[in-house]
């Protein structure tokens, strides 16, 4: 049976790059759903499952989504079938969620979930957000959220492992540590 490796933490902490480096044949990424429009380089069913708001609400109502959240007027969620297929499969799979998603998955699939918090200090987050996000208001919003919520002990508490990916940290070493955590958790069960 497969495990679900849940990566969570603040924006610009490195979660997406870690997931990208982990994703390979034999370690798939779970595709989540969203109502936001696809960006120019995004493909439906590869980057996200792009749904209209009515279809998303229907999936919420019918219990097809195991968790969901609203962000900037758009909905994001995880299909129950995606999680159950990954658990039934022969290999581990990864997913990036927020704290509510981590808690929802741990509540329903406790023995199949490995939650890894990926953090970074405020200086690292600020520099990375400046580089990737030209919208100053959005950047300020993300940093405020990180400072008030995502960098707190309470936010990290559900994690099975906590890693820091600050500027100056060797990314290859961070990735190696993630792989070691996954391997050690596999041996424990």
Image (cartoon, rainbow, N blue to C red):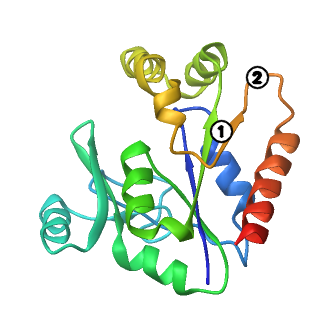
Mark 2 crowdedness (10 Å alpha carbons): few <14, some 14-19, many ≥20 = some
As drawn, the label of residue 167 is 2
**How many numbered discs?**
2
Q: Where does the image place residue 10, in percent across and percent down from the top left?
A: 52, 32
Q: Would residue 28 be found to the left or right of residue 73 on screen?
A: right
Q: Where does the image place residue 105, in percent across and percent down from the top left?
A: 42, 61
Query: Where is residue 126, by image quadrant?
Result: top right
Sequence order check: which comes first, mark 2 or mark 1?
Answer: 1
As drawn, the label of residue 14 is 1
Q: Where does the image place residue 167, in percent across and percent down from the top left?
A: 76, 22
189, above or below 95, in the image: below
Q: Nearer the viewer, residue 81 or 105?
A: 105
SS at mark 2 in the image: loop
Q: Would residue 29 be found to the left or right of residue 137 on screen?
A: right
* Residue 39 visible here: no
179, above or below 8, in the image: below
Look at the image and tell me in which quarter the C terminus lies.
bottom right
Query: Where is residue 24, by image quadrant?
Result: bottom right
* Residue 178 visible here: yes
SS at mark 1 in the image: loop
Query: Where is residue 183, by image quadrant?
Result: bottom right
The residue sitting at the front extreme is 188
Q: Residue at x 73, y 63 (%)?
A: 185
Asked whether disc 2 touches disc 1, contact meaning CB atoms under 8 Å apart, the reply is no
Q: Would residue 143 be found to the left or right of residue 29 on screen?
A: left
């Amino acid at each position: 049976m497969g495990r679900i490796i849940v990566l969570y933490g603040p924006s610009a902490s490195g979660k997406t790059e870690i997931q990208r480096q982990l994703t390979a044949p034999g370690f798939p990424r779970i595709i989540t759903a969203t109502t936001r429009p696809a960006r120019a380089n995004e493909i439906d069913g590869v980057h996200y499952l792009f749904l209209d708001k009515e279809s998303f609400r229907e999936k919420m109502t019918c219990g097809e989504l195991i968790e969901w959240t609203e962000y900037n007027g758009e909905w994001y969620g995880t299909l129950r079938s995606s999680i159950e297929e990954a658990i039934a499969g022969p290999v581990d799979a990864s997913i990036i969620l927020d704290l509510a998603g981590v808690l929802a998955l741990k509540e329903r699939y406790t023995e199949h979930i490995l939650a890894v918090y990926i953090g970074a200090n405020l200086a690292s987050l600020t520099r990375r957000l400046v580089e990737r996000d030209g919208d100053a208001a959005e950047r300020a919003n993300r940093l405020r959220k990180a400072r008030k919520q995502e960098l707190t002990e309470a936010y990290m508490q559900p994690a099975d492992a906590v890693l820091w990916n600050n500027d100056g940290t060797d990314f290859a070493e961070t990735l190696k540590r993630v792989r070691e955590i996954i391997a050690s958790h596999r041996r424990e069960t």
